[in-house]
Image: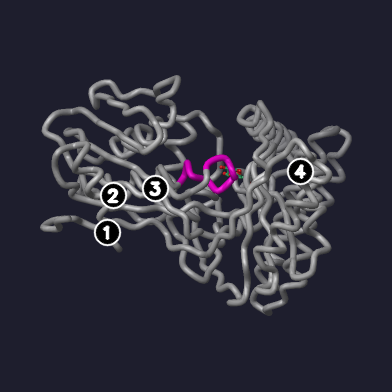
Amino acid sequence: MHLESGKVSRFESHFGRSPTVVTRAPGRIEFIGNHIDYNGGRVLGMAIDRYIEAAASPREDDCIALRTEIHEPVEASLSDLRPVRGSAFWANYVLGVVHAFRDAGASVERGFDMEFSSTIPAGAGLSSSAALELATAKALEVLYGFPLSEERLAVLCRHAENTFVGMPCGILDQGVSVAGRRGHLVLVDCRLPRFERVPLPEALRFWVFDSNKKHRLVESLYGKRHEECTEALACLQRRFAGIEHLVDVAPDQLEATRRDLGDPLYSRVLHVIEEQQRVMECVFALERGDMRSVGERLDASHQSSRVLFENSTPELDGLVDCLRHRSGVYGARLTGGGFGGGVLAVTSPRFARSDAEAVVRDFVGVFPDCTPAVFEVGWGDGASSAGCDGWRV
Ligand code: GLA
């Protein structure tokens, strides 16, 4: 791993000594598989070339001192590790991982200093939160001499987010951030979890159009969808044996339970079942190099999120509409939790920045109050760490 002198010298000027470990973890795009990770599904994501990096060093006392380029510094004590509120809320992603390491059996007795920097745009649905968790976890593996498999790291970081941050997310973000590999998508089997790498055709470009607009209640709406899925699952399980997750439901079982479920639960389950099907169709189409078929699945995924799962917004729909029929665009869909955030467009190399800017202009013509941002992202590698022993700026 390449050690950046800026990061190390910033750590040194803040903490007065060298870091002993530096780590980095990528953000991700959700390629396809919307809201099926916490329903036992298989989802496709890609690690991107934007990262959260951390530099860290152990301390003699039990204090955890955290710094970033943009937040107020936070200090916490290992003897009283609990979620924090207010402007220090971001630190819960870090403290939650420390807590989870301790629960997993690591001997977490001494504290540490840690400094973060990021090139992942926040709020665009690229999962800077999972990257923060993984950058922390890779550092803790070294600081506490407690190495973990990719699967355990992802499970532990998800657990931290569910329990310490209070976000009932699935394992897509953590799985992709830990298991990403250049030139590949990660197929995450969320039930186990297990990661497989799916090679990508070379000549593709990936664009994220950030609507820069988020529903005011985005977190609670995500939680609401999670609850609806849990309720629908309980209803189906009362009727049929052998259903562990919503993705196990067969179409005829869903139809037979339609009246009991009512709407919107019926629509939520239909989305989950069909979205799972689309993910696997995408895997096969990628194997054949059939990008037209992949693109059709991406478009259909967006329409299903919009109509059946109802987690889109007028702005995300507007961006998808502006992208759909442009030359060079294979497909476009909302990426991540929805209710705001960004749209992913997968294109051929002939779709250039000037085309992306034309899309933004068209969109602003319809949504004059919106100022979307567009990023081209490339593929990245999964989370990694490097020791700094003997390394000097
Ligand atoms: C967010 C969550 C993921 C996943 C997606 C929707 O990114 O963190 O676990 O549920 O939304 O697919």
In primary-sequence order, the first of circles 1 and 4 is: 1
Above or below, 187 relative to 60? below
User: Can you tell which mark lies on residue 134?
Assistant: 3
Residue bearing mark 1:
3
User: Looking at numbered disc 1 in the image, what kind of residue is underneath it?
Assistant: Leu
In primary-sequence order, the first of circles 2 and 4 is: 2
Callout 3: helix, strand or loop?
helix
In primary-sequence order, the first of circles 1 and 3 is: 1
Residue bearing mark 4:
269
Which residues fall within the magenta stretch?
122-130
User: Looking at numbered disc 2 in the image, what kind of residue is underneath it?
Assistant: Lys
In primary-sequence order, the first of circles 3 and 2 is: 2
Q: Tell whether position 351 is magenta.
A: no
Q: Distance of mark 1 from mark 3, alpha carbons?
A: 18 Å
Callout 1: helix, strand or loop?
loop
Which quadrant: the C terminus? bottom left
